[in-house]
Image: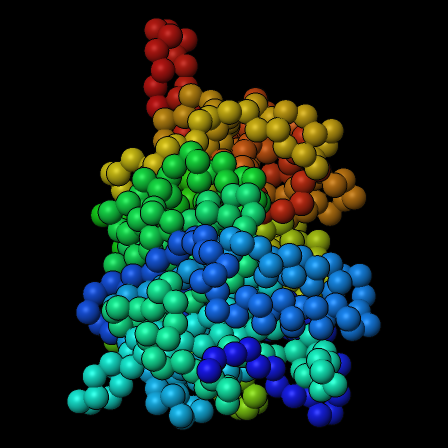
Amino acid sequence: MFMIKFLENQARKVEGLGYSGVETFKGDPFSSCVRETAQNSMDAGDGSGPVKVAIRLHELDRADIPFADELCEVFDACLAENIDDRTRQHFLAARKIAGSEIWKVLEISDGNTTGLTGPLDDMHSVFNVLVKGDGVTSKLDAASAGSYGIGKNAAVAVSSIQCVIYSTLAAAGVGKGEMFAAQGRIRAISHSNGGRFFGAEGFWGGEDYSAVSDVASVPKWMRRTDVGTSIFSMGFREERGWEGRVRLAVLCNFVCAIDAEAVEFNVNGTLINRSTLDSLLLSPELEMLAIEFDQRSSLLVARRLLESLRSEVAVERRIDDAYFGSFVLRVLPRQGMPKTVHVVRNGIYITNNFKKFAQPMASFNGTSDFIAILQPAPDSEGARASRILKSLENPAHDAFEPDRIVDVETRQKVRHAIKRVVEKMRALLKEIAKVEEGGSVQLDDLSQALSSGNGVMAQGLQAAEESDPVVLRYSSARRFQGSEPPYGAGRPGAAVQKGGRGKGRERTRGAGRGGGRRLGSRGAMALEDVVFTLSADENPRGRRLHFTSASEGRSSISLHVAGLYGLDSLAVESSSRGEVKQGQVLLDLERGERVALHLVIEEPYRGGVEVQLHSVPRLSTESGSSKP
């Protein structure tokens, strides 16, 4: 006989709806449900091919729900308790769903997996740990995607009645054929019924809280004919746009795994695999969904990652660390890319920083534009790196946190190892996304904060007024690298309305991706020993620029700052030397000359500045022709 049975509450402990294991995922239930359940399926892959994850919505007759009447009784008992308005509203809605003739049920099933293995009478088996365990994982592989044993609650978060059914077909053991098992788990509140006190946790199955092992005893929708697992969120929290939000979550979280053919999805009939990935990810419909549900930045990251994965000019380099293990860094140098590195583990997107390790990875000075992916190498050394990363992941799997390692000595070793890996990564980025043939340098205008007498002195600077500068490493002008056109639909050039500077006027110079128009420039010129600081006076628009010219001739100096679609011009109003024209400084330079300029920019600005130096042709008074 199968029934719903709640754990007895002998201590009369009060348990409410605010169960942290479920509340963790309610903020973004659809994305959380997809991410957590799919990564569990990937961890259970049997190696026979891509893990197949199917997500489909069913409408079931109440007569096919063997525990519908029992749930109504449970919800009535909960409503009889002394509860607040929020809890009452929840159980009123749950009671209505349980009494409905048609039930909405979301099924997430997998294939090419091992299923939830037994034995069923072993409390530590994979099946029992998933269905009945709390805060414990059944995954023996320390490099698996999941780690906390709470991800299963994501399926509860999309159930309006907080009821989930698990069904699996798995190998029973060597020579023992296959094993079927099904069991349900319900999350309510502590309540009393018939003079007995019960806790918030209940199970559907055998009288002794056991699973149903006779496949003929369960309704057809709960049965499986092939090895794998099905999870049913009963009373699905159906909302407008849920299907699109699920597709969006799949594409944003699993773009690397799908491209590597480690997993493929079917969302209510929409197939998402390597063949369909491009068209789905670049579709206008997905763009509109992302905008509507505030996920456009995540979608943009996924598109850029796919662009890197598809590109033939992307470069891969290996990073080895004796303690941490090995990583593969894949870099696509391309104009317009945001100069960001994205950490991926087991094909699943995690984050773009090691912020908690004092490695925010927010600035990559001295490189051209790029997009990069950092992930553990596909070998034993990479598995070691993945194990360490896993130990650092937070429950949401979107950040790495050092304090999750309990042992202080190990924690310090990991801190140092991450610093070494990031340093090697930065060196590789400067090599791969290097800039050639010209002069631009990315400057962090922090001299006011640093000029306290403790600033580092630039090597070889002679002028007294250059003391206590911000020391900068030179890099050349940005250049598009690679012969491919930008991936997908490009961004149209347009004037960018900038806020927060001056009076917020429209900056039309350099519309679109580029910076401002250079005054008849013929080519970039090299800069050396560049120092850019705030002026010693109190003028917030004053700047000091020092550099050594590696070229000679008529030149233009222009300043640029990061804009929405690339670089925006930062106009110069006056200069202590040369002529200011269209916001740029024109002057004659000699090779090897040390140049010191006092500049005033048109608008107050605090932040990174890029200096570019270009040659300007002279106009001949005899023929009117231009000469370099």
Q: Nearer the viewer, residue 158 or 380?
A: 158
Q: Nearer the viewer, residue 354 or 118?
A: 118
Give the residue furthest to the left: 175
Horizontal and vertical percent position of residue 201: 61, 79
Note whether residue 385 is visible: no
Q: Is residue 13 above or below residue 309?
A: below
Horizontal and vertical percent position of residue 277: 31, 47
Q: Is residue 90 above or below residue 625?
A: below
Q: Nearer the viewer, residue 515 or 204?
A: 204
Horizontal and vertical percent position of residue 310: 27, 48
Q: Is residue 526 above or below residue 226?
A: above
Residue at (24, 88) in percent of width and height: 173
Q: Which color mode does the image show?
A: rainbow
Count all numbered tags in the image, as a single digit: 0
Residue at (31, 43) in percent of width and height: 278
Q: Nearer the viewer, residue 229 or 32?
A: 229
Note whether residue 496 is visible: yes
Query: Quarter of the image holding residue 170?
Result: bottom left
Query: Quarter of the image holding residue 580?
Result: top right
Residue at (41, 14) in percent of width and height: 619
Q: Quadrant of the C terminus?
A: top left
Horizontal and vertical percent position of residue 39: 40, 67
